[in-house]
Image (cartoon, rainbow, N blue to C red):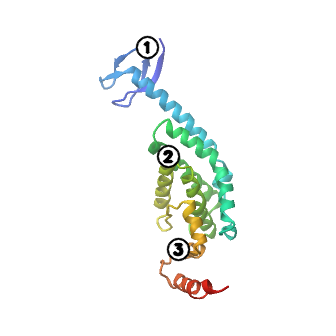
Amino acid sequence: MQFISAQCPHCGKELQLPDDAQQVVCMYCAKPINVQQVLHAQEDTDSYRALLHTAKELMKDDVVAYKANIQAVNNHGYPEAFQAYVEKLAPALRAFCVAAEASTAQRAAEEYSLFLMERFLELFQKLQVKENDTTFFDYRYTVVAFLIPAILEQGHEATEALADQFLEKWNKQYPKKPLGKARYDEISHGFRQRLCFITTAVCEFQGKADDCYELTTFRKFRDDWLAKAP
């Protein structure tokens, strides 16, 4: 017989449970405990923790610190740049999906999105990036056009939840600079349809409305003159 540390499922106190017992009574709350169920759940939790730790280890610094070259992000340059980013991020996301399958999509997404948000906050603190800096805009743009679409590109229930949870945390941290959820196809289609993605992002960064003077003028120029030019 061996004793294994585990938590009481009723009161949460830590106990030493005999691994060959079927049922015991908690010494703290006096409620019955199915020992084998508790030990099995403990094994599942330990496995999930190990898998999630691997996923965190694979989220390399150069992936978090990646900053898109906005000038190269256009109808021709975006697909290649995005694919390169996806390949960098893929090992961490694949490991995350394996961890989620050992638990639940929502639980894994909540924990991993918090980890990812903390990594960005540490990076911003290290680089002394402020919310109104142009560098912050660069990272914000990278999250919109690269990180979130790359997460969604995995097509897994857990990565869908991860994108939602991360955006929720980002928008809570930066309520004046909120981000939306966009997929790669939507963004690349926008480039092909000449939707002035960069101009819109810049105006949004400056706090201007979608119908502001600048955007209205650029759109009129695009539709009334530029679209008709050879």
Residue 181 placed where, x, y %? 50, 61
Query: Measured along the vertical axis of the image, is residue 192 above or below residue 104?
Result: below
Q: Which mark is residue 20?
A: 1
Query: Measured along the vertical axis of the image, is residue 71 above or below residue 10?
Result: below
The answer, for residue 67, to whether it is visible in the render is no
Comparing marks 2 and 3, which lies closer to the viewer?
Answer: 2
- Circle 3 packing at 10 Å, graded few (<14), some (14-19), many (20+), is some
* Residue pointed to by mark 2: 158
> What element does badge 1 sit on?
loop
The mark that comes first in sequence, 2 or 1, is 1
Residue 141 placed where, x, y %? 59, 65
Q: CA distance from mark 2 to mark 3?
A: 30 Å
Q: Nearer the viewer, residue 14 or 165?
A: 165
**Which residue type does callout 3 highlight?**
Glu
Residue 22 placed where, x, y %? 37, 16
Q: Nearer the viewer, residue 144 or 53?
A: 144
**Which residue type does callout 2 highlight?**
Ala
> Looking at the figure, which quarter contains the C terminus?
bottom right
* Residue pointed to by mark 3: 204
Report the residue at 66% width, 62% height from top: 79
Report the residue at 60% width, 38% height from top: 54
Query: Measured along the vertical axis of the image, is residue 63 above or below residue 71?
Result: above
> What element does badge 2 sit on?
helix
